[in-house]
Amino acid sequence: MNITEEENDFTKRVLENNQSENDADIITYIETIHSIARKKTTGYLKKHQVNYQQWRILKSIYLELAITPAKVSAATFTDSGTISRQLELLETKGLVKREHSKQDRRVVNLKLTPEGENVAKDGIKFSEKLIDCVRDKIGAEKTKDFHQALIGALKCSAFCNDK
């Protein structure tokens, strides 16, 4: 899925309005980068007949960030009802299996099928190509610094309480 001319024009306006003194621009940049990455990834994933949200679920299970529906919900910042519907679709597509925990039958664990693993890995490889584009543009050292800065921002946003 390509970026539309209007979206490309918006990105140009964001870049032309570069006022490094304006902290609000940081959020605009993050939102714009996310929107572009999401749109490109969505287009790429069409060949697997999964949408972006479904791929994020597969990825969270594949990376072992989450193995239960509740943990997938937390890992993807998605409400539990949406996760349930998406898991049903992924199960129907043969990408995910649900299994009751042997220790506690009330707990449902999620496992990827071999096909689900392939879709997760393929989407991750595509994401890596997007990062390669960043690396090519700003260099390996700045990409590493950018990664560290994002980790710092994530730590702050995850642990700050609104007062």
Image (tube, rainbow, N blue to C red):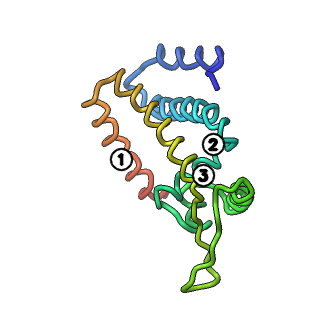
Residue farthest to the left, as pictured: 141
Q: Position of residue 63 (x, y in %)?
A: 46, 56
Q: Which mark is residue 115?
A: 3
Label 2 vs label 1: CA separation? Answer: 23 Å
Q: Nearer the viewer, mark 2 or mark 3?
A: 3
The residue that appears at 29% across and 25% down in the rendered structure is 139
Q: As shown in the figure, which amino acid type bears the numbered disc 2?
A: Tyr
**Residue drawn at point x = 50 percent, y = 56 percent:** 62
Residue type at tag 1? Ile
Q: Nearer the viewer, mark 2 or mark 1?
A: 2
- Mark 3 lies on a secondary structure that is helix
Q: Classify 10 Å Cα crowding around label 1: few (below 14), some (14-19), many (20 and above).
A: few
- Percent position of residue 136, x then y: 35, 22
Q: Are the residues flagged by discs 3 and 1 in contact, CB closer than 8 Å?
A: no
The part of the image, by quadrant, that contains residue 76 is bottom right
Q: Judge by depth and name the residue closer to the eye, 101 or 141.
A: 101
